[in-house]
């Protein structure tokens, strides 16, 4: 069982859902998802400080942090905070380049311990190797 925190932009939740679907359909691969979906009550935090602490607690049990490396991630305040938290907590970061993307986030890729393409086997192998 792998404990994962999947960072994503709520504005691009379709990509997050596609990634979860890929992982769910991988035979002989079990994981617990510690990410913060859009409807999570964590969003009721009254300020950024509380939200950051809530995300830190959510990320704490994860062995790896998966970050979708779409160009939008460069400009996402919260994805950048999640990178900061992952480093603070000594979590391995796996950057996943979106399918058929022409440009990706340099910030995410520079922060990553491993960069993989949008391929189930590549993603799962990176999780297994880094966990």
Image: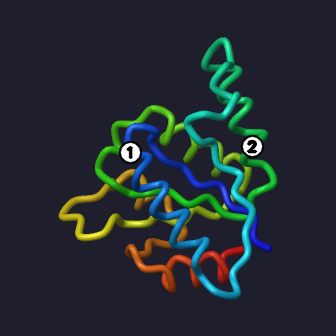
Q: Residue furthest top?
A: 46
Q: Position of residue 61 (x, y in %)?
A: 81, 54
Q: Which residue is mark 1?
A: 12
- Residue 69's disc is none
Please tell me how crowded label 2 is: few (under 14), some (14-19), or many (20+) other residues with Cα within 10 Å.
some
Does dot 1 land on a helix, a strand or a loop? Answer: helix
Q: Position of residue 9 (x, y in %)?
A: 44, 42
Q: Report the front residue among 90 and 20.
A: 20
Q: Earlier in the sequence, mark 1 or mark 2?
A: 1
Q: Is residue 52 above or below residue 94?
A: above
The residue lying at 51 percent from left, 85 percent from top is 121
Query: Is mark 1 in CB contact (under 8 Å) with mark 2?
Result: no
Q: Which residue is mark 2?
A: 58
Q: Position of residue 33 (x, y in %)?
A: 69, 57
The residue lying at 59 percent from left, 81 percent from top is 26
Q: Residue furthest left?
A: 102
Task: Please identify the quarter of the rendering in which residue 118 is found.
Answer: bottom left
Q: CA distance from mark 1 to mark 2?
A: 20 Å
Please tell me how crowded label 1 is: few (under 14), some (14-19), or many (20+) other residues with Cα within 10 Å.
few
Task: Please identify the quarter of the rendering in which residue 3 is found.
Answer: bottom right
Q: Quadrant of the N terminus?
A: bottom right
Task: Please identify the quarter of the rendering in which residue 119 is found.
Answer: bottom left
């Amino acid at each position: 069982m792998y404990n994962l925190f999947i960072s994503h932009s709520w504005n691009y939740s379709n990509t997050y859902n596609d990634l979860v679907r890929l992982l769910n359909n991988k035979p002989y691969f079990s994981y617990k998802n510690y990410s913060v979906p859009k409807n999570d009550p964590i969003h009721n935090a009254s300020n950024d400080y509380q939200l950051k602490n809530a995300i830190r607690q959510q990320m704490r049990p994860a062995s790896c942090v998966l970050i979708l490396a779409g160009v939008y991630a460069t400009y996402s305040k919260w994805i950048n905070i999640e990178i900061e938290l992952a480093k603070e907590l000594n979590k391995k970061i796996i950057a996943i380049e979106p399918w058929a993307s022409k440009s990706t986030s340099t910030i995410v890729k520079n922060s990553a311990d491993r960069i993989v393409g949008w391929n189930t086997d590549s993603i799962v192998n990176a999780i297994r190797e880094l966990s």
